[in-house]
Image: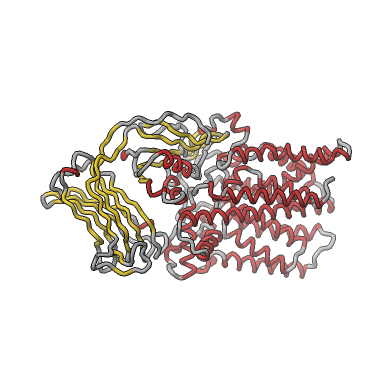
Amino acid sequence: MLSKIRVWHLAIFCGIAYLTFGLVSIDQYGISYDEEAQRYNNGYYNYFFITGQDKDLLRTGNEKYHGPAFEVTLVFIEKALGLTDKRQIYLARHTVNFLVFFLSLVAMFFLARGVFKDDKWGLFASLVYGLFPRFFAEAHYNCKDIIFLSVLVISLYTLYRFTNKPNLKWALLHAIVTGYLVDVRIMGLFMPVATIGFVLYNSFISDKRLSLLRLTSVLGAYVVLQIGSIIAFWPIMWDGPMHHMMSALKELNRAEGVEGYFFWTGDIKYWGEIFRFDEIPRHYILGWMLVTIPIAFQLIAGIGLVLILIKAFSFNRKTHQEYGFLFLSFVCMVGLLSIIIIKRPSVYDGWRHMYFLYAFFVLIGTAGGKVLWDWIEGLISEKNTKPTLAIFFLLIFGGSSYSTISHHPYQFVYFNAIATTFFTPVEENFEMDYWGLGYRQGLEYVLENETGDIALMVEHPPGYDNHHILKGNEAERLIYLQGLHKKGMYYLADYRAKKKLEPAISSELVKKLETPSGAFLWIYKTLDSLHVQNVAHIERVDFESEEDALIDETAPVGPKVDWVGPGKEYGYTLRKTADSTYVNGIFAARIKAKLKSEIVEPNISYVLSIGRNGETIYWGGKWIGYIFDKPNEWTTWNVSFDDLESVEVKVGDEIAVYLLGGAEGRVYQDDIEITLLTYVREDFPTKKKLGNETP
């Protein structure tokens, strides 16, 4: 057999390799669907509550019952590092996210090492845990499900230590970890219940039972510390723990009418069909597990389940001492999965809401791997043990290792051979990139293949959010058009909740992002687009020569800035009389400026108006208050008025562009650039089709 020293060396090597691969991959993942909302509506709302800047944002928000612990942690790290650039903020978030997952990987090693009393099986369990291809990718950006799984694994380790050494030290450590777990997701409440049950069970089967007084005092201390930890890590609980805990539990049960309630009502693509959110089959979670967990891992877990069922009916105390933790894992996994199947709550986007079950799956699978190895070891001679063990590990982990590498950096759309054999093409049967990560590479492709400004449309919000993580100033070339009728040069689609993968507009496919599992992003170049015909006027102002400009030493260009707010409703106004350069095309206006607000989400808009003979023939406002997710920080923003197809500008028309402010908080603008232009609609030849290229 391998010596403990050699196993440790191998474990350290694997850990360093995994950590290195994960860290160098940080900048290869985009921004996921929920990250911007989680960072702002969850993290910052709680941060403002904690610091006393604004408590009503959290009290009235719809994220107050979505566990805030990790999001608040990320915001405090962001503040401690002094990060203001969105790209750097998200790279930092992804780094912390991955490090937490890696910490749980280490915890899994020590947990399994203790449960199976062998370093080899600690390494085996950590490989089953870390070489699930989807988890490697999601460990970088999934700030909810993967973090919940990670903290659960750590809490299982502290539970193992607590049950073996039921003293105040481990009661405190376990209470802190499980308190944080509950405050990442309230579903974590099962863990304190499991803790009490398992401590009692372990005391009953132990040869050295605790006295009733000792048992009561230790568990009592744990319960008190647990309650304190839950309240400490969840700011809204400070307003009234019982009231808010009951409301959070109602949301967990999807009860209607809960203040701050969020409920998914979208369609879901699964098993080749499109289902309403409230009509998904009961086998939804099991079906997703079947097609995404590596087949080798499913086989060993099946063996482990059979072993545990056999051992569970043994009333031998020694057997229960040896398999007690595995019994707990079995009860938790099967029990929680059964509740989900029976109650059928709102779950979507695969089985990500149930990722935490994988912690128990790993322990059960490791038990199955050990049984299988013990059987193989009994068939071979001692001199063949080492090479056979190496082949055994290779057979179990070779496929998942290859898939993690071959799908990189798109492991988030990994499907196993069951899906790629019986559900082809996979993209027509299951949701692919429901996180929207691929939009980053889609935007990079568009920027690499075009010069100048690029007008484009995206099917879902991550297509916009991912411009924040692009390198350099490339994102400033992107002009997002809202609505397919505006006909940008490119259209990016992920076909979430769609069975037919057809473009929504007349276009030609120029790029398809795909992996061995299937395609997940389609990039089209439109056949009928708007192109600039004539730039009528460009005006740039830095306000240094404006007499009524305010002094602001933080201004990005000189110390003077323009402003709107209480006492000043209108900002700098551009006024032009249209001549022949403004007509014979579709009129449009673009505004680019650096902006700062004293408050979050101020009531502020850029306005374009067109007057003729004393009457207003067009007045349009673009509300941009939502770009200010934190006060007193400068940000660059582009806004376009490109939806004026029904407005015919004539010579002599009066055109005005200005910033319109609200009655609360000042908003400052600097380095403003206003472009007035006309578009013309025309067909143009597209590039040669790239077919089904694999990036």
Residue at the (63%, 50%) spot, across then down: 20
Asked if 511 appears above or below 542 in the picture, the reply is: above
Residue 505 appears in the rendering: yes
Going 76% across and 42% down the picture, which residue do you hit? 369
Of residues 389 and 293, the one nearer the viewer is 389
Indicate the position of residue 131 as horizontal and vertical percent values. 66, 44
x, y percentage for residue 164?
A: 77, 61
Please name the residue shown 55% across and 29% down the image.
424
**Left or right placement of residue 121 versus residue 518 in this view:** right
Question: Does residue 277 lie above or below 35 as drawn?
Answer: above
Asked whether 46 or 17 is in front, the reply is 17
Residue in the picture at 41% in, 59% down: 629
Is 653 left, or right, of 259 in this rendering?
left
Q: Nearer the viewer, residue 578 or 340?
A: 578
Counting from the top left corner in percent of width and height, residue 575 is at 19, 55
- Horizontal relation, residue 64 to residue 527: left or right: right
Q: Residue 601, percent across and down?
A: 37, 60
Q: Quadrant of residue 634?
A: bottom left
Quadrant location of the N terminus? top right
Q: Is residue 258 visible?
A: no
Relative vertical location of residue 313 with respect to residue 201 in this rendering, above or below: above
The answer to which of 154 and 476 lies nearer the viewer is 476
Q: How many marks?
A: 0
